Image (cartoon, helix red, strand yellow):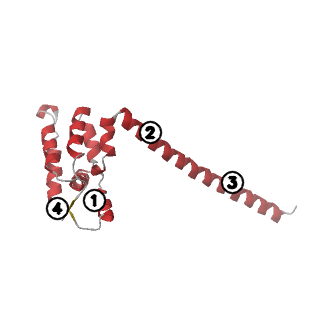
Amino acid sequence: MNKQTGLKIAGGVVGLLLVVTIASHIRRRQKDKLAAELLREISKVVKPSTEGLLSENAFDIHYENEVLKKVSGKILVIKQEVAVKYAERIHSAWGAWYEGGDDENKVYAVFRELKDKVAVSKVAKAYQNLYGENLIDKLYDKLDDNEIKIVLNIVKPLPAYRTV
């Protein structure tokens, strides 16, 4: 066997190994994604209050865009300035222990004023833009399980959107 044939065989083996590696990597990622979905669903059953915010689409900052894609008519959307004011009110509710702690009622009041889930999404997006932190993460950090249930009980019955 000459040198050129040996190089072709080695190149073919390397190419085959590359294809096998890529295929196994893709398959592993698909399995990981399925496992993560399964764990999310199981944890919703096991801990429904803490997983509730994640399962509630209203806290997704892209929810407005998803609704606009699905709905053919015009929907009512709060102005960006209004969403910023609500986000600022939520942020002002967080306080240090020496300042009297957090004011959960302020947070509940904001969510009670919102008329639909698109508005909740706009506020969540404004909060992230203003403070660089996901609103869901902040709520988990500042509220206990019972307080999260209260927020969910306020947001869940809201309509997905309102039309003009």
Counting from the top left corner in percent of width and height, residue 64 is at 27, 59
Within 10 Å of disc 2 (Cα), the crowding (few <14, some 14-19, many 20+) is few
Q: Earlier in the sequence, mark 2 or mark 4?
A: 2
How many residues crowd mark 3 within 10 Å: few (<14), some (14–19), many (20+)? few
Q: Which amino acid does label 1 sit on?
A: Glu
Q: Which element carries disc 1, helix, strand or loop?
A: helix
Secondary structure of residue under mark 4: loop
Q: Which residue is drawn at 26% across and 42% down?
A: 138
Question: Which badge, 1 or 2, comes first in the chain's sequence?
Answer: 2
Percent position of residue 44, x then y: 37, 38
User: Residues under labels 3 and 4: Cα distance?
Assistant: 55 Å
Dot placed on the residue nearer the N-terminal end, 1 or 4: 1
Depth order, front residue of 117/23: 117
Quadrant of image for the C terminus? bottom left
Furthest-right residue in this view: 1
Q: Mark 1 points at which residue?
A: 64
Binning the other alpha carbons within 10 Å of mark 4 as few (below 14), some (14 to 19) or many (20 upward) gives few
Q: Nearer the viewer, mark 3 or mark 1?
A: 1
* Residue placed under numbered mark 3 in the picture: 17
**Amino acid at dot 3:** Leu
Q: In this image, 46 relative to 140: left or right?
A: right
User: Type of residue at label 2?
Assistant: Leu
Give the residue drawn at x 20%, y 53%: 116
Q: In this view, does 105 lie above or below 65?
A: above
Front residue of this view, candidates 140 and 162: 162
Task: Tell me the SS state at disc 2.
Answer: helix
What's the CA distance linking mark 2 and mark 4? 37 Å
Please state, as top left, top right, bottom left or bottom right, where the N terminus lies in the image. Answer: bottom right
The type of residue carrying mark 4 is Lys
Residue 97 visible in the picture: yes
**Pointer 2 residue:** 39
